């Protein structure tokens, strides 16, 4: 008896599952689906517009980037030319300074030679005269 009662209750609970949908039920389901889809369609349209605007901005940015690349390339060429010119000027100035140092070295060397000659020459002359006098005095002493 209990089993029969349980089986009967089970069949009563599962009976609506076997029922078929009416035309009104189908229309109601369609209406609910349309109501749920409508905000999604609006959101999709909004996203499409956003995508189009982003693509337009990207295209504008791409043009600006190309212009910046051209400007940077031009500036790079100008800077390279200016650096080459500056390098030439610096090299010329270093060469001029080197020539001046070389001239100064020769001048200092000449002054040193003149100073040595001015100091040593009189002493050498004095030493030469003393030797000459010594030789003469020795000759005189030998003859006497």
Image: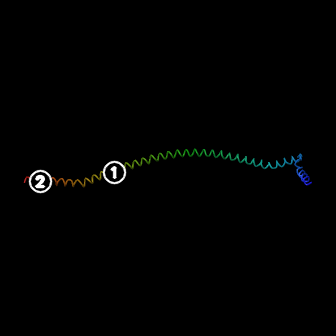
> Could you say where residue 84 lies in the image, as x and y percent from the top left?
47, 45
Q: Residue 130: x, y in percent?
A: 16, 55
Res 123 quadrant in image:
bottom left
Between residue 140 and residue 121, name the one nearer to us.
Answer: 140
Left or right, 137 with reference to 61:
left
**Residue 60 quadrant:** top right
Q: In the image, 103: left or right of 17?
A: left
Q: Secondary structure at mark 2?
A: helix
How far across and down, in percent of the image, does residue 81 sit? 50, 45
On residue 105, which mark appears? 1
Residue placed farthest to the right in the image? 1
* Residue neighbourhood size for the residue with mark 2, other residues' Cα within 10 Å, grouped as few (<14), some (14–19), many (≥20): few
For this rendering, which residue is in front, 15 or 2? 2
Q: Residue at x 34, y 51 (%)?
A: 105
Q: Earlier in the sequence, mark 1 or mark 2?
A: 1
Which secondary structure lies at badge 1? helix
C-alpha separation, residue under disc 1 versus residue under disc 2: 47 Å
Q: Nearer the viewer, residue 100 or 28?
A: 28
Tell me, yes or no, whether the two marked residues, 1 and 2, touch with CB atoms within 8 Å: no
């Amino acid at each position: 008896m209990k089993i029969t009662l349980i089986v009967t209750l089970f069949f009563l609970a599962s009976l609506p599952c076997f029922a078929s949908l009416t035309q009104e039920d189908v229309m109601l389901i369609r209406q609910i689906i349309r109501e749920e889809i409508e905000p999604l369609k609006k959101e999709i349209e909004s996203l499409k517009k956003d995508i189009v605007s982003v693509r337009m901005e990207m295209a504008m940015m791409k043009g600006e980037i190309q212009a910046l690349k051209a400007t940077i390339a031009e500036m790079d060429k100008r800077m390279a030319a200016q650096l080459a010119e500056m390098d030439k000027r610096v090299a010329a100035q270093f060469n001029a300074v080197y020539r001046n140092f070389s001239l100064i070295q020769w001048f200092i060397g000449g002054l040193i030679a003149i100073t040595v000659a001015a100091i040593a020459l009189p002493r050498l002359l004095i030493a030469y005269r003393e030797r000459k006098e010594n030789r003469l005095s020795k000759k005189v002493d030998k003859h006497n």
